[in-house]
Amino acid sequence: MKVTVLTGGVGGAKLVLGLLQVLPAADVTAIVNTGDDFRHIGLHVSPDIDTLLYTLSGKANPALGWGRADESWNFLDTLRAMGGPDWFALGDRDLALHVLRTARLAQGQGLDAITADFARAMGIGAAIVPMTNDCVATQLDTDEGRLDFQHYFVARRCTPHVRQVHFDGADAARPAPGVIAAIHGADAVLVAPSNPFLSIDPLLAVPGIADALVATPAPVVAISPIIAGKAVKGPTAKLMAELGIALANRSIAAHYGAWIDGLVIDLGDDAPPGLAIARTETLMRDHADKARVAQVALDLAASIAG
């Protein structure tokens, strides 16, 4: 069963890790948000891609929830001592990935090929594909003016009030090689429980991806990021409130619209009408939880396909 996942960072990485426990790695493709990508002290950083790489290779830092395990911080300490920008923490091991990526991009190589090479070097059998090789930047109109995503998310810790979300450069972007084929060729397409507005919407803003989701013969199943009227993590709840959107599964279903066929929701939560629904405990604390949520999503997709 070939499965394609639309994903952001941490929550999506957990789902993909769960899929790798129940499916052969070669049958799993993750299409990853790159709207969070940015340049920091001259380096190209791809936070969501790197979260997938570290999580699927067993190198993620479980204590911090981001970055690499067994990290050291000599570079950051020196940068800080020299008066450099230290608001975005780059560890010594993490730094190597950004340096190599930046050098290869400067040589004209595509982010898709670079990411595939990193995945192979880290022993990952699943395909990790950026949504585009072009520059798309998530930006937020806030009460402090327009902010790039990382300045909103990391530097300002999601404090500013958000009025609108933009994806600069999306109109001119093209899906990365393999993205459309992965959607059309899948037996099931899953939408990870990532932030719909900041992690999934950037993918949909790239011309061709939303159309592929409408056209694919595969069932499309989303996993809701909401549990008991609360968001699992991150700024989802705050952002939805500021945008005047009810924190409910019906809002997630309405936001994705007609291109999803099913929704996995937590036990006891209200089910939106008009969709195939599966229920399970959707909070993914450990490997067993991840595998269970992944299997429930696959079972729902199979039942929709008949």
Image (cartoon, rainbow, N blue to C red):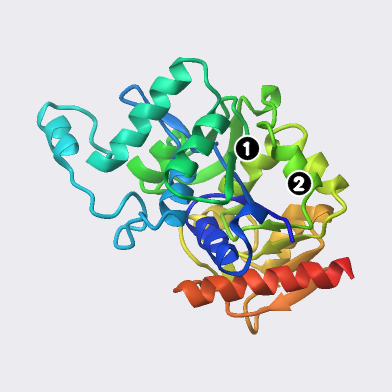
Residue 164: tell me if it is visible.
yes
Q: Secondary structure at mark 1?
A: loop
Q: Nearer the viewer, residue 63 or 154?
A: 63
Q: Nearer the viewer, residue 86 or 128?
A: 128
- Give x and y (percent) for residue 170: 65, 28
Q: Amino acid at mark 1?
A: Met
Q: Residue at x 52, y 76 (%)?
A: 289
Q: Nearer the viewer, residue 216 or 142?
A: 216
Crowding near the residue tagged with mark 2, few <14, some 14–19, many ≥20 C-alpha atoms within 10 Å = many
Residue 272: tell me if it is visible.
no
Q: Looking at the image, is mark 1 or mark 2 nearer the viewer?
A: 2
Q: Residue furthest top?
A: 107
The reply, left or right, for residue 86 in relation to residue 171 is left
Quarter of the figure with the C terminus: bottom right
Q: Residue furthest left?
A: 81
Q: Amino acid at mark 2?
A: Ile
The reply, left or right, for residue 3 in relation to residue 61 is right
Tag shown at residue 131? 1
What residue would you read off at disc 2?
183
Quarter of the figure with the N terminus: bottom right
The reply, left or right, for residue 94 in relation to residue 250 is left
Give the spatial CA distance, label 1 vs label 2. 12 Å
Tell which circle, 1 or 2, labels the residue nearer the N-terminal end. 1
User: Please, is residue 24 above or below residue 148 in the view?
Assistant: below
Q: Residue at x 34, y 22 (%)?
A: 42
Location of residue 65 (image quadrant):
bottom left
- Give x and y (percent) for residue 23: 63, 64
Q: Nearer the viewer, residue 120 or 191?
A: 120
